[in-house]
Image (tube, helix red, strand yellow):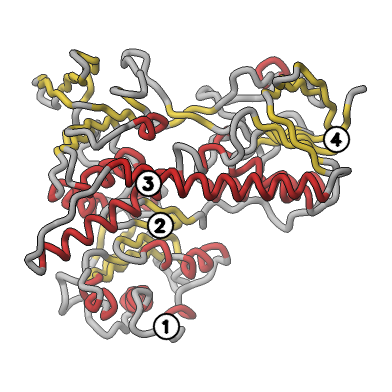
């Protein structure tokens, strides 16, 4: 007998799990299928593991800095201890999700079902699931595809996940490598450059094809990160093209070409290739049943709905923003479209992001590059952490707030970047203003706690309104106010 469900969710990563749990609220029959581990890249070899790694490295670097300040010896750090702490965090979260899943299955035996296996679409309603016990065919009125993504590999590079690795291979390390070359100066590449350089055990080389790292962000932010990476001993190969990377005598040998055509060879103990991710569409049946895909293999969707009206796509399998919080939002939204009536389409313009660098970076909405590319006239203010009492008290004044607003009376918020301590906790109020299309007046008059980092946001807004305590024309090294109109900056 073929089992029938109101919904089948294929993939148990962040977006698929969020979708399945939202479907539970509607008391429909739900089947969740996952081929490997519940939690996906959100836990394993991804967000949780790398951020735990970063937190440990950050604490260690901060502690060493304080020891040096007080003339004391720096401690030693054991890689096995670090890796055990990362694994403990992963296991804690994984056990929590699995415990929750089992209780859901137990408490809702007539509504919620789980299969571990590979799911493939036969048509718009039929799915075959290959499990350890054989094949099982199921029928679903609606289907959500949440099969995620994996690190992209380059055909000419001999990956073995031990010497030349993707981010999936980091957990295979047994000790800190003496040297590590990282190909790719995007977020993930820069995060791992930050992590390994923080521990002070590894000589890190970072290959950037652009003239600076993080080329999608404004220069002032990227340069702040570059300065700290280089202070930690990171060698940045700017505007460099990788010609060749291979394993020679158990180590990495790589050849890069500089902008002037000169070629240079380097050696490293290990290599990490971080050049993006690709969607997991293999053996899903998506191509066979005619789901519309982009050239890169992502599912093309309209507010999570695919070209087949009862099939939805969420998370990294789509070409939208590949973040855990976005995937979860999409998963929940897809279920609400299927069984309910969402109040509005998903809004991506107020998605908050964090970059785990040195210093920490958080953002929401547009940066200056994006505003200029879009032809928008805007005003921008920058407020340095050196002017924030809490940052002074913390003895860590590196960083700034940067807020963009429209160049009109409404002064509608376009975007914000926070660089420095507590950055990730500082952007939600501005994200709410973007989501509600509000101006900045209300936030300027809100009484913020003192002393706190977020007081800097208030003063940044007051700079835009022309009523800040510190004046930008007086403190020119700490504060910035400028207008961009008709393709150029104006006084």
Q: CA distance from mark 4 to mark 2?
A: 40 Å
Tell me the number on the disc at residue 172: none
Residue 453 can be seen in this image: yes
The reply to whether the C-beta atoms of the residues labelled 1 and 4 are less than 8 Å apart is no
Find disc 4 in the rendering and name its residue: 5
Q: CA distance from mark 1 to mark 4?
A: 50 Å
Q: Residues within 10 Å of mark 3 (few under 14, many from 20)?
A: few
Upstream in sequence: badge 3 or badge 1: 3
Q: Residue furthest right?
A: 1
Find disc 1 in the rendering and name its residue: 448
- Figure check: 263 above or below 17: above
Find disc 3 in the rendering and name its residue: 373
Upstream in sequence: badge 3 or badge 2: 2
Find disc 2 in the rendering and name its residue: 363
Query: For this view, does 95 lie left or right of residue 10?
Result: left
Q: Residue at x 33, y 59 (%)?
A: 485
Element on which disc 2 rests: strand
Element on which disc 3 rests: helix
């Amino acid at each position: 007998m073929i089992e029938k469900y109101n919904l089948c969710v294929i993939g148990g990563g962040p977006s698929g799990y969020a979708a399945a749990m939202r479907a539970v609220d509607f008391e429909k029959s739900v089947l969740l299928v996952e081929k490997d581990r519940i939690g996906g890249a959100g836990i394993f070899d991804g967000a949780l593991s790398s951020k735990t790694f970063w937190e440990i490295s950050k604490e260690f670097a901060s502690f060493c800095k304080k020891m040096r300040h007080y003339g004391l010896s720096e401690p030693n750090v054991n890689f096995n201890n670090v890796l055990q702490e990362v694994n403990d965090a992963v296991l804690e979260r994984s056990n929590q999700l699995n415990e929750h899943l089992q209780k859901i299955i137990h408490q809702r035996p007539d509504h919620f079902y789980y299969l571990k296996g590979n799911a493939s679409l036969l048509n718009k309603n039929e799915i075959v699931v290959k499990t350890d016990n054989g094949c099982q065919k199921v029928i679903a009125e609606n289907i959500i595809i949440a099969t995620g993504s994996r690190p992209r590999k380059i055909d000419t590079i001999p990956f073995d996940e031990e010497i030349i690795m993707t981010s999936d291979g980091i957990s295979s390390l047994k000790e800190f490598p003496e040297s590590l070359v990282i190909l790719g100066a995007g977020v993930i590449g820069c995060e791992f450059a930050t992590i390994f350089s923080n521990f002070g055990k590894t000589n890190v080389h970072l290959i950037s094809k652009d003239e600076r790292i993080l080329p999608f962000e404004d220069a002032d932010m990227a340069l702040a990160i570059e300065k700290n990476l280089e202070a930690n001993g990171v060698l940045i190969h700017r505007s460099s093209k990788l010609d060749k990377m291979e394993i020679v005598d158990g180590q990495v040998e790589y050849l890069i070409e500089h902008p002037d055509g000169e070629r240079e060879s380097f050696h490293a103990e290990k290599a990490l290739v971080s050049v993006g991710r690709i969607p997991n569409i293999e053996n899903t049946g998506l191509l066979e049943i005619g789901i519309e895909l982009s050239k890169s293999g992502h599912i093309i969707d309209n507010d999570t709905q695919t070209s087949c009206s009862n099939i939805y796509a969420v998370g990294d399998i789509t070409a939208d923003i590949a973040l855990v919080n976005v995937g979860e939002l999409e998963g929940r939204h897809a279920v609400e479209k299927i069984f309910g009536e969402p109040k509005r389409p998903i809004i991506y313009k107020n998605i908050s992001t964090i970059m785990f660098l040195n210093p920490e970076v958080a953002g929401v909405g547009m940066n200056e590059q994006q505003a200029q590319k879009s032809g928008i006239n805007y005003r921008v203010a920058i407020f340095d952490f050196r002017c924030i009492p809490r940052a002074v008290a913390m003895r860590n004044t590196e960083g700034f707030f940067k807020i963009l607003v429209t160049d009109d009376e409404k002064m509608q918020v376009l975007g914000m970047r926070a660089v420095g301590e507590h950055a990730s906790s500082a952007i939600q109020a501005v994200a709410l203003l973007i989501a509600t299309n509000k101006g900045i007046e209300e936030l300027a008059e809100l009484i913020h706690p003192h002393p706190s980092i977020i007081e800097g946001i208030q003063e940044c807004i007051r700079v835009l309104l022309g009523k800040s305590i510190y004046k930008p024309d007086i403190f020119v090294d700490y504060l910035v106010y400028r207008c961009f109109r008709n393709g150029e900056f104006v006084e």
